Image (tube, grey):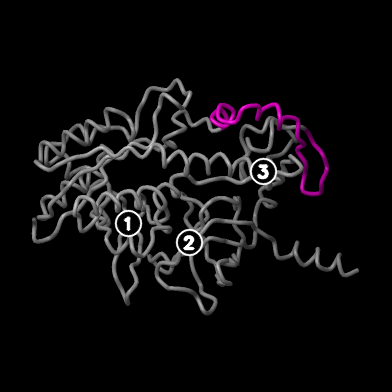
Amino acid sequence: MSKKGRVLVAMSGGIDSSLAAVLLHEQGYEVIGMTMKTWDYASSGSSKKETGCCSLDSINDARNLAVNLGFPHYILDIREEFGDYVIDHFTDEYLAGRTPNPCVLCNTHIKWDSLLRRADKLGCDYIATGHYAKVREENGRYIISRGKDLNKDQSYALWGVSQESLSRTILPLGDLTKPEIRKMAEDKGFYELVNKSESYEICFVPDNDYRGFLKRRVEGLEEEVKGGEFVLEDGTVVGTHEGYPFYTVGQRKGLGIALGYPVYVTEIQKDKNRVVLGTFDELSRDGMYVKNLVMSKYTSLEDRLDTVTKVRYNDDGAPAVIEQVGDTMKVFFGNGVPAIAPGQAAVFYEGDDVIGGGWIHSSFNQQKLKNEALSNSI
């Protein structure tokens, strides 16, 4: 065995995970490659050609790279556990009127756990992925932080990885940028990786039509939920919709309603099958409650803390004061944040470090809460 140890590398067949494996191999680690098959395209009901991390082409690309560099490669079939957890959760969240984030859930609850179990069986000291993020040990805590390439930073997707898992995780691309990775691939002659297109779709919704996916997966759903009401913030009914699961907070396009001015989905009322519409200003919220916390930099927070908080993957983040109460984080935004969607992940940053994260439970407006309290007291 190498003096640096044996590492199990998650290889999707794309340029990032492939170069992660190459770099570790060159650094003297004993590398074992593993490609996880999470989804079977044939069962998706989509007519789109099979592409992405679970396709046969991607699996073969990962295997060929391993063979060429002389290290073992295995295929790990986790379709059953992936479907039972990630896909069922995806469906259940939309039916509950929330907006799920399956990629974060898969990273933190399926891929890391699956990799570590197989790493133990293969005698591996570490696992590694091609994420653009960093991990370090400090004061007995393993801390995720932003990668060097802020345009590709994926620290948001890793907030839920446990301390035990982080203690055995290597992220080789954390100090590199995407252009540097592409140049490296070119210099090493991996031209097929440089020219390979990247997929940003949910793997089990390859046509990006989550509505169609839900209709195919839940028999009778369309008939059950159609005909609900579009209402304004004051309760005024302004039209009917196709069913609450088919809308998300912040949505503007595809509403099928014209009011003479731009409107957005500001709230999903599942029990009433109502979709609330409002202006962009009405979409803004002063704060939110985040539950199911996983803390990274600190075990817990004793006092309020100034942070930058992200409420979605492509969010730049907004200044926020956070306060932990048990397993709930109360988040207060100074200037308001639009489109806070229950079901999405919220991640709290101190500088480049991930303090922790959790799932958005609900949002609020301070003034609205004060008005309701005043009304109830009269």
Q: Quadrant of the N terminus?
A: bottom left
- Asked if residue 374 is among those painted magenta in the image, a careful observer would answer no
Earlier-in-chain disc, 1 versus 3: 1
Find residue 265 and name its label: 3
Determine which residue is flagged by label 1.
133
Assign a secondary structure to mark 3.
strand
**What is the span of residues highlighted in magenta in the rendered image?**
211-239
Comparing 352 with 78, the one in front is 78
- Asked if residue 226 is among those painted magenta in the image, a careful observer would answer yes
Q: Amino acid type of disc 1?
A: Ala
Find residue 358 and name its label: none
Q: Describe residue 128's horizontal placement relative to residue 244 as left or right.
A: left
Find residue 357 and name its label: 2
Q: Estimate how packed mark 1 is, as few (under 14), some (14 to 19) or many (20 or more) residues with alpha carbons within 10 Å.
A: many
Q: Is residue 102 above or below residue 239?
A: below
Q: Spatial distance from mark 2 to mark 3, Cα to Cα?
A: 25 Å
